[in-house]
Amino acid sequence: MKNLDKQLKIGLVPTRREAFANETTTRQKEAVVKRFRELAEELDFEIVTIEDINEEGLLMTYHDVKAAYKKLTAAGVDALIFPHCNFGQEEAVGRLAKDMNLPVLIWGPRDGCPNGLEWRPTDSQCGMFATTKLLMHYGVTFSYIENCAIDSDILKKELADFLAAANVVKAFRALRIARISSRPKEFLSVMVNEAELLEKYDIEIVPGEPTVILDRVDRILAEDRERMEALLQDLVDAGLDISALGEKRYPLAAIELALMDFAEANDCNALSCECWNLFRKKYGVSPCFILGDLNDRGLPAACENDVHAAITSVMAVAAARYKTPSFVADLTIRHPENDNAELLWHCGSFAKKLKKTDANGRIVKEGKGFYELEGGPVTVLRFDGNHGEYYMFAGEAKGVDGPVTNGNYLWIETDNWVKWEKKFIFGPFIHHVVGIHGSYSHIIQEACRYLGIRIDLPDMPNRY
């Protein structure tokens, strides 16, 4: 898989107005740096400071911009935070933010009580109004945390959200997708415009021709029994019953290893795969469970060669900061008793880690997983496009009880299913969605602002 460093590096760039130096600003800067170092430990990110670009470690002049740019670029930071330690230097912040072209967070500590008729020493809130106006002139997208105290819970919570959004931007901008074979003939709805994805978003599709992939599978079957046995034992250790596979367990393991090897060899960080004919006709096993297991192992993978679903999956797991896998599901049928509930289902391609605790997990002889998923909060996403415009649907639901069915499934309840249903009918979305456990729609919305993707929520008007 593509070697994407999953720990965020954040450039911490405190700033002050050059004309207003005072002891309060110096103390404020020191307190800010100390607090962000603490938050870096708590929220698991790395800080790159500008302590050594000048005597004060503050961004104040265009000369500072050049020095900060050189240091932060060399360090490979993924986003920038500009704490305003007094009014801040808007021209320096604007220039550095424009040149770096990364997610930007603006924040300043809440100002203290005025001391009679003396000059106020900071006025950080005032300066942020000026900085953000300049960022708009520069065309720089930015995030903002309200003017709050350094030790406020607001700072920690909203910083965590910014980090997650920056993580989505980082993952999206590094996308390189292995596309295994072609789409199934009947699935015109999963067509994609490869040239457009490359031109608009720098997303490259790497074709995995059937002969190349099948040759990899055959070589693993013939020469790599040890790796196959290790993978199969891993499935058993995870509590899955694989007995129904019989001798087909070796082709299943070989196909999964071949797909992982192809992604690794071609520096891909996601995969979409034809799942109807390629493997089933030669080996008698479908790659359904395999694709779910790839998600479990950190390689987002979509069935029915749905490239847009693979893109959505990468964004979903990045929003969750890789704490849980996503799953690609069909919007299938309405709940027989709950008008606001719907069945998220697929024929066996959901990550085993997501299995409901008390559900019996098994892989049937065709190579498909059979188990229900754990409930709780679920974010439902879909990246898709039409006529050169790209959109992201983002909605939130919760897992609920419902009738038992085959394959992998989860019943979800929405606030108003009819709105969701009409949203997908009028598109530009299809029946495939990506689900991920947790509440991430606000993270995805923020990331889409940076990426130039139009957000589409259930309550927004339909377009067609």
Image (tube, rainbow, N blue to C red):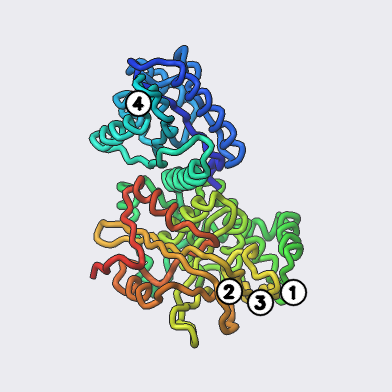
Alpha carbon separation for disc pair 3 and 4: 67 Å
Reading the image, the residue beneath label 4 is 87
Dot 4 or dot 1, earlier in sequence: 4
Q: Which mark is residue 365?
A: 3
Answer yes or no: do the residues labelled 1 and 2 have beta carbons within 8 Å? no
At a point 32% along the width and 41% down the height, the residue shown is: 141
Residue that protrudes farthest toward the top in the picture: 55
Which of discs 4 and 1 lies nearer the camera? The answer is 4
Dot 3 or dot 4, earlier in sequence: 4
Dot 3 alpha-carbon crowd within 10 angstroms: few under 14, some 14 to 19, many 20 or more: some
Asked if one can make out residue 140 in the rendered structure from this viewpoint, the answer is: yes
Reading the image, the residue beneath label 2 is 408
Q: How many marks?
A: 4
- Tell me where residue 68 sits by quadrant: top left
Alpha carbon separation for disc pair 1 and 2: 18 Å
Alpha carbon separation for disc pair 4 and 2: 55 Å
Q: Secondary structure at mark 4?
A: loop
Alpha carbon separation for disc pair 4 and 1: 68 Å
Q: Secondary structure at mark 2?
A: strand
Q: Amino acid at mark 2?
A: Asn
